Amino acid sequence: MGHQSNNQTKIRYNILSAVVYIIGIVLLLQLFNLQIVNGEAYREESNTRLTRETTLKAARGNILDQSGNKLATTTTGTSLELYKSKVDTQTLNQTLLKIAQVLEQNGDTYIDNLPIQVEPYQFTISEEEAKTWKQENEIDENKTAEECFAILKEKYEITNENIQEARKIMTLRYSINQAGYSSTKAVEIASNISEQSLAQFSEQSAEFAGINLGITPIRTYPSGSLASHILGYVSRISSDELKGNEDRYNANDIIGKTGIEYIFEPYLKGTDGVKQIDMDVNGTVTGEYVSKEAVAGCDIALTIDANLQQVTENALKTSIQSIAQEDNVSVTGGSAVVMNVKTGEVLALASYPDFDPNDFTPSISTEKWNYYTSEETSEYARNHPFVNRAISSPSSPGSTYKMVTAIAGLETGAITTTERINDVGIYRFSSDYNPKCWIYQSYGRGHGYLNVTGAIVHSCNYFFYEVGNRVGIENLAKYTRALGLGKKTGIELLGERAGYVASPETSKSLGQTWNGGDILSAAIGQGNNSFTPIQMAKYTSMLANGGQDIDVTIIKSVIDADGNEVSKEELESFLKERLGIEEDTSEKITFNQTNLNAVLEGMKGVTTEAGGTANSIFRSFNIEVGGKTGSAQTGQVDSNGKKITNAWFVGFAPFENPEIAIVVMIENGQSGSNAAVTARDIIAEYFGMNANKVTEDMTAIPSVQTNN
């Protein structure tokens, strides 16, 4: 009985062993089938079925004015993304064409990094950039744009005969291939699409294999062109910008190109997050979750006052258009700066013509780009709307420089505050160079005896010829630099230029010969003296604040996503490297207040005394303003055959306890009085006056004082 039981146990054991063996063989065969025979297909299906990854884009930091008003901010929109799907090349191409057509018919744009235009064929990048592009795409560098297009058409197996349709397909194929799209990672091909496009893609999703609609942050500028030269603009990152930054950016990202958007890009850009999307094999979303939260970028608070900025821009634009119409001259542009005389904070900075940063997000249309840049077809482009004239366009300051000559004369003892010089009309310098005072050219006489204060009031060229001649060019150049002219202010914007201080060394560097009589031109703000409006604002501030040097700034603070303020030490270090700021080694000078007062009294007389070059503009004003007009001759003629004379006004207010300095420069504005009108309206806004009432009370601008 026990023997029989043992036999049965052995039989059961053998059967069980056989079953286990067979199961093991089956499992091994199945594993072999999964991993070796059909491994790639199953892995692709598994990826498609299980999880896809999409980027949660971080909101870009806001750019604010001093009161917290949003000048640049982030809204949300719907993005169109594309995953790699199991369709053949022809189906993919036709799907992309349909996507492009839907977007275009609804006025939406899509990513377009292809540097080739058709009809006519041409590269949209420089010759050198095209050479590099061909190398990167393994195309012979001698191939034309048309030949390159044909090569890509064959590479992407595009069979459409319609060239425009072929380019639409090629554009999207090129862009998604560049971005490295896959079945698990989407590529954004359009952002902020319209409700019409959203509805079509949602209702007809079966016709668009691989698409996904998501939420994306959109950079917007609520006030349009307001402060555009300060803010700058963002646009889609280029391949060159992406190189070396792949750890923080991808081909879908926008990046700051100019202005604050560019300078503070490392702070404004947040840190993207990641969202996982679970799908079944049919592409139906079965679940989604955030695996990494996005962190918004830092907010940048500016020193700008948005209301004052708007008034400054409007006043500048109105003056430019009025001068062009009434004087029949070609006025190409202008700029204006308002600065706190004690802190160096910029309260308004305007440059005209301007642009709308919204046009560039996420990419600008060809039509709009040509409007801004094509000088052959666009009059607007000929006036260079992207140039920030306040910091990038140095020019001769004319008579607004005469306070420098006065200070140099007084501080060196070349003149005193009471000495009177007799202007007889013609300054006898040498046998072949005897320049005339502007009043002699207009009335055939001189100003007579004037002290330094009176010379500023009446803008007497003769007086300053004599002072400049006594002081000498070395001293004149020294005091010019001490007052912040001819060197960068360090404002936190890209493209600031230093300009030039007239001197023998400057002439030599420019390939010119310095002649003895050049000191006379330098003394009245002509010759090689060439300064930017932002420098002139610093100079005017130093006159008004007792000669104290100031650090010009447009940044109030930088606040991170947690509400913490970035330290000044960190910002200084960052900006020094970002802007390439060099240490200022020029001599610091302490000015005698009595000498400054004599000069300031002259500036008050310009606006308050009969015969003052801006008296007719400010005589009914509610507060006293210190100012100086300037009409700087360029030696050129405009398109109407008239001599080009740039109009300047520099000033500060109130006179007794100065708060702001203001500088206005209008290219070919003809008379400094024209610039003074612009300044008056801006000052009225700052001090809360009724600008319209003030304007109505003003008398006509005199036309005889065209050199001051």
Image (tube, helix red, strand yellow):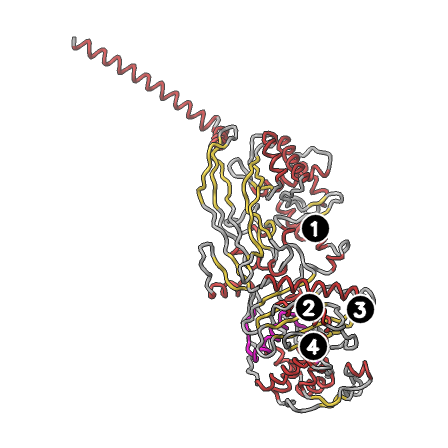
Residue type at tag 4: Arg
Is disc 4 placed on a helix, strand or loop?
loop
Bounds of the magenta segment: 524-552
For image coordinates 47% across by 38% down, the residue present is 276
Q: Earlier in the sequence, mark 1 or mark 2?
A: 1
Label 3 and label 4: CA atoms lie apart by: 33 Å
Residue 121 is one of the magenta-drawn residues:
no
Residue type at tag 1: Lys
Label 1 and label 2: CA atoms lie apart by: 39 Å
Q: Quadrant of the N terminus?
A: top left
Q: Earlier in the sequence, mark 1 or mark 4?
A: 1
Mark 3 in CB contact with mark 1 (< 8 angstroms)? no
15 left or right of 355?
left
Q: Is residue 264 above or below residue 631?
A: above
Label 1 and label 4: CA atoms lie apart by: 45 Å
598 left or right of 326?
left
Q: Earlier in the sequence, mark 3 or mark 4?
A: 4
Is disc 2 placed on a helix, strand or loop?
helix
Q: Residue 453's image quarter?
A: bottom right
Q: Residue 340's image quarter?
A: bottom right
Q: Nearer the viewer, mark 3 or mark 2?
A: 2
Mark 2, residue position: 693
Q: Nearer the viewer, residue 443 or 697?
A: 697
Is disc 3 placed on a helix, strand or loop?
strand
Q: Is residue 528 visible?
A: no
Q: Earlier in the sequence, mark 2 or mark 4?
A: 4
357 left or right of 666?
left
Mark 3, residue position: 637
Residue type at tag 3: Val
Is disc 1 placed on a helix, strand or loop?
helix
